[in-house]
Image (cartoon, helix red, strand yellow):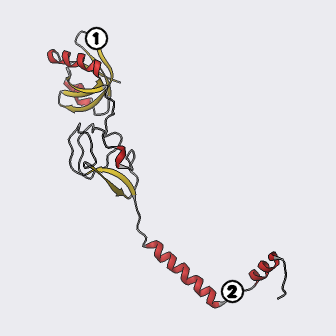
Amino acid sequence: MTLSIRPFDRVRALLRRRPSVAWRRFLALGLALLAAFGAFWPDVGHPAVVASRDLPAGVALSAADVRLASFPAPVTGSFSGVDAVVGRSLSGAARAGVPLTDFDLSSASPDLVSVAVRVADQGLADVVRMGDRVDVVSPSAEVLAENASVRETRGQVVVLTLPRLNATRVAAMSLDHALAVTLR
Protein backbone atom coordinates (compact mmCIF):
# COMPACT_ATOMS: atom_id res chain seq x y z
CA MET A 1 0.00 0.00 0.00
CA THR A 2 1.31 3.37 -0.91
CA LEU A 3 0.96 6.32 1.33
CA SER A 4 -0.91 9.15 -0.19
CA ILE A 5 -1.29 12.58 1.24
CA ARG A 6 -4.80 13.06 -0.14
CA PRO A 7 -7.56 11.99 2.31
CA PHE A 8 -9.71 10.64 -0.50
CA ASP A 9 -6.99 8.21 -1.53
CA ARG A 10 -6.56 7.01 2.06
CA VAL A 11 -10.29 6.27 2.46
CA ARG A 12 -10.41 4.49 -0.90
CA ALA A 13 -7.46 2.30 0.06
CA LEU A 14 -9.08 1.37 3.40
CA LEU A 15 -12.32 0.42 1.67
CA ARG A 16 -10.50 -1.88 -0.76
CA ARG A 17 -9.13 -3.96 2.06
CA ARG A 18 -11.20 -6.90 3.23
CA PRO A 19 -12.24 -6.61 6.92
CA SER A 20 -10.65 -9.10 9.26
CA VAL A 21 -12.55 -12.11 10.63
CA ALA A 22 -12.46 -10.66 14.14
CA TRP A 23 -13.98 -7.39 12.92
CA ARG A 24 -16.78 -9.24 11.03
CA ARG A 25 -17.57 -11.35 14.11
CA PHE A 26 -17.64 -8.29 16.31
CA LEU A 27 -20.01 -6.56 13.86
CA ALA A 28 -22.29 -9.67 13.68
CA LEU A 29 -22.41 -9.91 17.48
CA GLY A 30 -23.30 -6.21 17.74
CA LEU A 31 -26.12 -6.56 15.22
CA ALA A 32 -27.48 -9.64 17.02
CA LEU A 33 -27.46 -7.82 20.37
CA LEU A 34 -29.17 -4.82 18.81
CA ALA A 35 -31.92 -7.04 17.35
CA ALA A 36 -32.44 -8.84 20.69
CA PHE A 37 -32.55 -5.56 22.57
CA GLY A 38 -35.08 -4.11 20.09
CA ALA A 39 -37.32 -7.18 20.31
CA PHE A 40 -37.70 -6.86 24.09
CA TRP A 41 -37.98 -3.05 24.19
CA PRO A 42 -41.33 -2.18 25.77
CA ASP A 43 -43.84 -0.25 23.68
CA VAL A 44 -44.60 2.94 25.56
CA GLY A 45 -48.04 3.07 23.96
CA HIS A 46 -50.23 6.07 23.36
CA PRO A 47 -51.20 8.24 26.35
CA ALA A 48 -54.83 9.14 26.94
CA VAL A 49 -56.70 10.75 29.83
CA VAL A 50 -59.09 8.35 31.60
CA ALA A 51 -61.51 8.71 34.49
CA SER A 52 -59.91 7.52 37.74
CA ARG A 53 -63.32 6.54 39.15
CA ASP A 54 -66.94 6.36 37.97
CA LEU A 55 -68.15 9.91 37.40
CA PRO A 56 -71.72 11.23 36.98
CA ALA A 57 -72.77 13.51 34.13
CA GLY A 58 -72.23 17.23 34.60
CA VAL A 59 -69.38 16.99 37.12
CA ALA A 60 -66.57 19.52 36.71
CA LEU A 61 -63.35 17.51 36.38
CA SER A 62 -60.51 17.97 38.85
CA ALA A 63 -57.02 16.48 38.81
CA ALA A 64 -58.19 13.79 41.27
CA ASP A 65 -60.97 12.68 38.88
CA VAL A 66 -58.66 11.84 35.95
CA ARG A 67 -55.35 10.13 35.31
CA LEU A 68 -53.10 9.38 32.34
CA ALA A 69 -53.11 5.83 30.95
CA SER A 70 -51.28 4.16 28.08
CA PHE A 71 -53.09 2.35 25.26
CA PRO A 72 -51.60 0.17 22.51
CA ALA A 73 -53.29 2.21 19.77
CA PRO A 74 -54.23 5.90 19.61
CA VAL A 75 -57.74 6.75 20.84
CA THR A 76 -59.54 9.11 18.47
CA GLY A 77 -60.46 12.40 20.12
CA SER A 78 -58.58 11.64 23.35
CA PHE A 79 -56.40 14.05 25.31
CA SER A 80 -52.71 13.40 25.92
CA GLY A 81 -52.47 15.58 29.03
CA VAL A 82 -54.52 15.90 32.20
CA ASP A 83 -54.37 19.71 32.06
CA ALA A 84 -56.51 19.69 28.90
CA VAL A 85 -59.58 18.34 30.75
CA VAL A 86 -59.29 19.80 34.26
CA GLY A 87 -62.09 22.30 34.85
CA ARG A 88 -64.28 21.04 32.00
CA SER A 89 -67.63 19.30 32.60
CA LEU A 90 -68.71 15.84 31.53
CA SER A 91 -71.61 15.76 29.09
CA GLY A 92 -72.44 12.20 30.16
CA ALA A 93 -71.45 9.68 32.81
CA ALA A 94 -67.94 8.18 32.57
CA ARG A 95 -66.67 4.80 33.75
CA ALA A 96 -63.33 4.38 35.55
CA GLY A 97 -60.49 3.54 33.18
CA VAL A 98 -62.36 4.55 30.02
CA PRO A 99 -60.64 7.21 27.88
CA LEU A 100 -62.27 10.64 27.86
CA THR A 101 -62.72 12.14 24.40
CA ASP A 102 -63.77 15.53 23.13
CA PHE A 103 -67.27 14.07 22.67
CA ASP A 104 -67.49 13.30 26.43
CA LEU A 105 -66.83 16.88 27.52
CA SER A 106 -69.29 19.74 27.29
CA SER A 107 -68.23 23.15 26.16
CA ALA A 108 -66.82 25.40 28.86
CA SER A 109 -68.90 28.44 27.90
CA PRO A 110 -70.59 30.15 30.87
CA ASP A 111 -73.40 31.33 28.56
CA LEU A 112 -74.62 27.77 27.99
CA VAL A 113 -76.90 25.96 30.42
CA SER A 114 -78.83 22.70 30.36
CA VAL A 115 -82.58 22.31 30.68
CA ALA A 116 -84.81 19.25 30.77
CA VAL A 117 -87.63 19.20 28.22
CA ARG A 118 -90.57 16.80 28.08
CA VAL A 119 -90.95 15.88 24.40
CA ALA A 120 -94.52 15.68 23.07
CA ASP A 121 -93.86 12.73 20.72
CA GLN A 122 -92.52 9.57 22.45
CA GLY A 123 -91.42 8.14 19.08
CA LEU A 124 -89.24 11.17 18.44
CA ALA A 125 -87.83 11.04 21.96
CA ASP A 126 -86.60 7.50 21.21
CA VAL A 127 -84.83 8.69 18.04
CA VAL A 128 -82.99 11.63 19.60
CA ARG A 129 -79.48 10.70 20.79
CA MET A 130 -76.78 12.42 22.81
CA GLY A 131 -74.84 14.87 20.64
CA ASP A 132 -77.71 15.54 18.20
CA ARG A 133 -78.61 19.13 17.37
CA VAL A 134 -82.30 20.09 17.61
CA ASP A 135 -84.66 23.05 17.44
CA VAL A 136 -87.29 23.42 20.20
CA VAL A 137 -90.83 24.32 19.13
CA SER A 138 -93.75 25.35 21.37
CA PRO A 139 -97.33 24.02 20.95
CA SER A 140 -98.19 27.30 19.18
CA ALA A 141 -95.45 26.60 16.56
CA GLU A 142 -93.11 29.27 17.96
CA VAL A 143 -89.41 28.38 17.74
CA LEU A 144 -88.08 28.71 21.30
CA ALA A 145 -84.48 27.65 20.64
CA GLU A 146 -82.38 26.78 17.61
CA ASN A 147 -79.43 24.43 17.30
CA ALA A 148 -79.59 23.14 20.88
CA SER A 149 -77.30 20.23 21.74
CA VAL A 150 -78.80 17.06 23.22
CA ARG A 151 -76.91 16.26 26.40
CA GLU A 152 -78.90 13.25 27.63
CA THR A 153 -82.13 11.39 26.95
CA ARG A 154 -84.30 9.56 29.49
CA GLY A 155 -87.56 8.25 28.11
CA GLN A 156 -89.69 11.20 27.13
CA VAL A 157 -87.36 13.72 28.80
CA VAL A 158 -84.49 15.20 26.81
CA VAL A 159 -81.79 17.34 28.45
CA LEU A 160 -80.68 20.12 26.11
CA THR A 161 -77.72 22.48 26.30
CA LEU A 162 -78.53 25.92 24.91
CA PRO A 163 -77.85 29.63 25.50
CA ARG A 164 -79.00 30.93 28.90
CA LEU A 165 -81.46 33.40 27.36
CA ASN A 166 -83.29 30.66 25.43
CA ALA A 167 -83.09 28.17 28.31
CA THR A 168 -85.28 30.36 30.53
CA ARG A 169 -88.05 30.51 27.91
CA VAL A 170 -87.80 26.79 27.18
CA ALA A 171 -87.88 25.85 30.88
CA ALA A 172 -90.89 28.10 31.55
CA MET A 173 -92.80 26.73 28.56
CA SER A 174 -91.95 23.10 29.40
CA LEU A 175 -93.57 23.45 32.85
CA ASP A 176 -97.02 23.67 31.26
CA HIS A 177 -96.62 21.89 27.91
CA ALA A 178 -94.73 19.07 26.27
CA LEU A 179 -92.57 20.60 23.56
CA ALA A 180 -91.63 19.41 20.10
CA VAL A 181 -88.06 19.08 18.88
CA THR A 182 -86.93 18.98 15.27
CA LEU A 183 -83.72 17.22 14.32
CA ARG A 184 -81.14 19.16 12.33
Q: Position of residue 64 (x, y in %)?
A: 25, 49
Q: Position of residue 46 (x, y in %)?
A: 40, 56
Give the residue drawn at x 39%, y 47%: 76
Q: Quadrant of residue 116?
A: top left
- Helix, strand or loop at disc 2? loop
The disc labelled 1 sits on which kind of residue?
Answer: Glu
In the picture, which quadrant includes the C terminus?
A: top left
Q: Position of residue 33 (x, y in %)?
A: 50, 79
Q: Quadrant of residue 31?
A: bottom right
Q: Nearer the viewer, residue 134 or 144?
A: 144
The outermost residue toward the bottom is 21
Tell which circle, 1 or 2, labels the residue nearer the N-terminal end. Answer: 2
- Helix, strand or loop at disc 1? loop
The disc labelled 2 sits on which kind of residue?
Answer: Pro
Q: Quadrant of residue 23?
A: bottom right
Residue hosting label 2: 19
In-image side of 43 versus 17 (left or right): left
Q: Is residue 170 above or below residue 106?
A: above
Give the label on residue 11, or none. none
Q: CA distance from mark 1 to mark 2?
A: 89 Å
Q: Residues within 10 Å of mark 2 (few under 14, many from 20)?
A: few
Give the residue drawn at x 72%, y 86%: 18
